[in-house]
Amino acid sequence: MASYSIGQAARLLGVSSETVRRWADGGRLAMVRDGAGRRVIEGVALARFAQERGAGLHAVPEGDVPTSVRNSFVGIVTGVRVDDVAAQVEVQSGPHRLVSLVTREAVEELALEVGVTVTARVKSTSVHIDLP
């Protein structure tokens, strides 16, 4: 079974190592000792924690219209490039950088500019997963 060090878990969760330690010390994140006596997080436990945390961080705000899109990322606009018809919008959501191509009209209607908080919703018919 895969296990992760505190630093690896922190990188995957987009937080500091100290935050992971506090979560473990507070009982929010289960840790075990490996053969060398180091504290590690078992992969299954980390995956479950990440899902639970993600549901709280990226939940659809109350009052939004219902949607079938379940992959929502709250973030901040870090870049907007606009031409005559299309625009490229960059969003940073925790450790994730998302880039979306939209119409110039959409950028204007939503008043998108650097520093604005947005929710990026992602729906795809194909997802590829690679091992590091």
Image (cartoon, grey):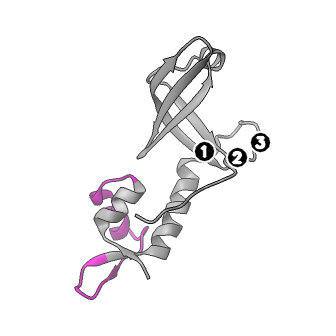
Q: Work out how far the residue at label 3 is from the one at label 2, CA to CA, in angstroms.
A: 9 Å
Amino acid under label 2? Val
Amino acid under label 3? Pro
Q: Can you say which quadrant of the picture contains the N terminus?
A: bottom left
Amino acid under label 1? Ser
Residue 120: image location, x then y, percent: 58, 37
User: Which residue lies at the image location 53% right of the left edge and 25% below the top edge?
Assistant: 88
Q: Work out how far the residue at label 3 is from the one at label 1, CA to CA, in angstroms.
A: 13 Å
Q: Nearer the viewer, mark 3 or mark 2?
A: 2
Q: Are marks 1 and 2 in contact (CB under 8 Å)?
A: yes
Q: Which residue is mark 2?
A: 69
Q: Can you say which quadrant of the picture contains the C terminus?
A: bottom left
Q: Is 43 left, or right, of 108 in this rendering?
A: left
Q: Label 3: how many residues lie within 10 Å, few (<14), some (14-19) or many (20+)?
A: few
Q: Is 110 left, or right, of 9 in this rendering?
A: right
Residue at the extreme bottom? 35
Mark earlier in primary sequence (3, 1): 3
Residue 123: image location, x then y, percent: 67, 46
Q: Nearer the viewer, residue 123 or 55?
A: 123
Magenta segment boundaries in residue numbering: 14-39
Q: Label 2: how many residues lie within 10 Å, few (<14), some (14-19) or many (20+)?
A: few
Q: Nearer the viewer, mark 3 or mark 1?
A: 1
Q: Specify the label residue 66 is tagged with.
A: 3
Q: Is residue 64 magenta?
A: no
